[in-house]
Amino acid sequence: MKATKNIFRLMGCVAALLLTLVACERRPLQEASEFVQIKVKVNVQTVANVMVDVYNENIPIPDVNTDMMRVLVYDPTSQKLLTQSFISGKTFDEEGNQVLSGTLNIAYGNYDFLVYNFDTPITQVSGEANEKDILAYTGEIPPAQKYRYSGMTKAEGDPESLMELDMRYEPDHLLVAREHNLRVSPHESVIVIETEARTVVDSYYLQIHVEGMQYASSAMAVISGLSPSNHIGLDERTVDPSVAVAFDLNKSTDPRLPGENKDVLCAIFNTFGKIPEVTSDLYVTFNVIDVAGNLQQFTTSLDRVFKSENAILHHWLLIDETWVIEDPLPDEPKNGGFQPTVDDWEEEHGEIVL
């Protein structure tokens, strides 16, 4: 009888143990992760004169590649900077677009994300502490370099010299991505944020037909009436005051031109953009140093050119004028080298001593 009771007790303990094993599952202690992975697709497929609408393939085009991007995280309410990171993991998607990726360490909450490429030697960024103040811009060309353009005037009959203009360097392409009030929920594994970066800089193609190309040693251009910067957190171009951009020109040809002479001076230049309201200040001055070392220049308005279909659809500034570069040495022989001449004989009388 006693043995029977012991057996029942043993069976009861076994059953209780089995119930305990079924009811309870042993799980490791886990904490919510604060790591967020960000992937930025760099979309440059529609950049005119770089990836599409290239008018002249024989001249250099701007570079839009990047190897590092800066990620800024802002409070959506105060717009103050909370944290930042740099990402440099680079891959390519199935369409050939660059994809930059990396991780951030942030708690859950709502955030504004601002991302831009950090490898731009000319384009500068300031005001990062506040999302509405962050500004992309370029520096002013120093007076020593402005002397390359000395002697040129703002417009025909206007005494203002280019030395007095606010002349800036061309900006590099700045690729910017924005995500506003994005929710990061509590999570136990790394979550992924995907976004897309596009340039805030325009690339234009400028061209003028020339005669007398053989007399040009070097050539430059200055275009006024352009935006000086971009508030990249707000995606707003600044408009006041306008600035001028200076750049070198290339000697090339355009087979589309009528007639035998196809010579052109041309270039692709970068800008934060044309200011829509600007008209009277919108002009281009071409500057040539001829083979004799003299400065020759040509100034024309770009108002009508910027309103053309080519400019609006393709960013092509094709000036429908011909600049004649004058022969700097019109009285010099054109065949080069020593040019012997023969005069009439003249009789001379004298004695020769042997």
Image (cartoon, grey):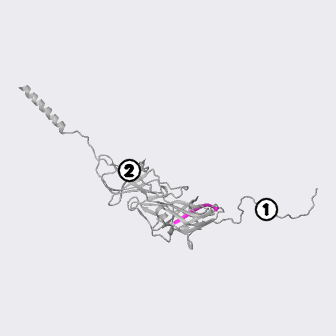
Residue type at numbered disc 1: Thr
**85 over 266 or under it: above or below:** above
Residue located 54% across and 57% down the image: 56
Total marks drawn?
A: 2
- The residue positioned farthest toward the right in the image shown: 354
Q: Say which of 250 and 311 sits in front.
A: 311
Does the stretch in magenta take in 218? Answer: yes
Identified by mark 2, the residue type is: Lys
Separation (CA) of disc 2 from disc 1: 77 Å
Q: Is 326 situated above or below 101? A: below
Quadrant for residue 78, please give it.
bottom left
- Residue 349: x and y in percent read 91, 63
Residue 276 horizontal/vertical position (percent): 45, 68
Question: Where is the N terminus found, in terms of image quarters?
Answer: top left
In the picture, the quarter occupied by the C terminus is bottom right
Residue most extreme to the left? 1
The residue indicated by pointer 1 is 341
Q: Which residues are magenta?
A: 215-223
Whether residue 144 appears in this view of the structure is no
Q: Is residue 40 visible?
A: yes
Query: Is 73 left or right of 295, judged from the image as shown?
Result: left
Is residue 255 depicted above or below 11 in this figure? Answer: below
